[in-house]
Amino acid sequence: MIFKAVGDGRPYPDHGRENTQDWSDVPPRQVRLDELVTTKRTLDLDTLLSTDSTFFGDLFAHVVEYRGTLYLEDGLHRAVRAALQQRPILHARVLTVG
């Protein structure tokens, strides 16, 4: 299995970070794909296969740590790309809430 679990929605409280600039003060770090729970069940193939999918967004995925679990909030396409390239690690901004 690529991820720890596939979720559907955000089980954690709202953290108020809505856009890339809001996340800029959260330092990136490495996280293992098998420690992540997704918050989306589907992935748009256009986003996955696009060569410029990170051009306008953050270079790092956004992960929320809540009650000891890491939830992949944004960057599912990056995580799947890493898995397809057989890389078990993803660089992400990890925000701890609650």
Image: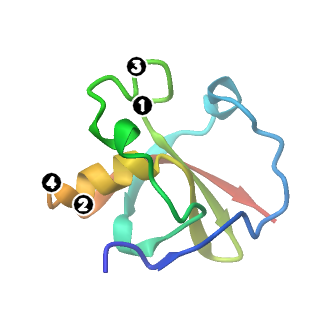
Residue 9 as seen in the image, left or right of residue 14: left
Q: Which mark is residue 59?
A: 1
Q: Mark 3 and mark 1 in contact (Cβ < 8 Å)?
A: no
Sequence-first tag of 2 and 3: 3
Give the Cα distance between marks 1 and 2: 17 Å
Question: Residue extending furthest left?
Answer: 86
What residue sits right under mark 3 in the picture?
55
**Quadrant where the N terminus is found in the figure:** bottom left
Sequence-first tag of 1 and 2: 1
Q: Which mark is residue 83?
A: 2
Residue 81 as seen in the image, left or right of residue 38: left
Q: Position of residue 95 (x, y in %)?
A: 65, 51
Q: Mark 2 and mark 1 in contact (Cβ < 8 Å)?
A: no
Q: Amino acid at mark 4?
A: Gln
Q: Mark 2 and mark 4 in contact (Cβ < 8 Å)?
A: yes
Give the Cα distance between marks 1 and 3: 8 Å
Sequence-first tag of 3 and 4: 3
Q: Residue at x 27, y 50 (%)?
A: 81
Give the Cα distance between marks 3 and 4: 20 Å
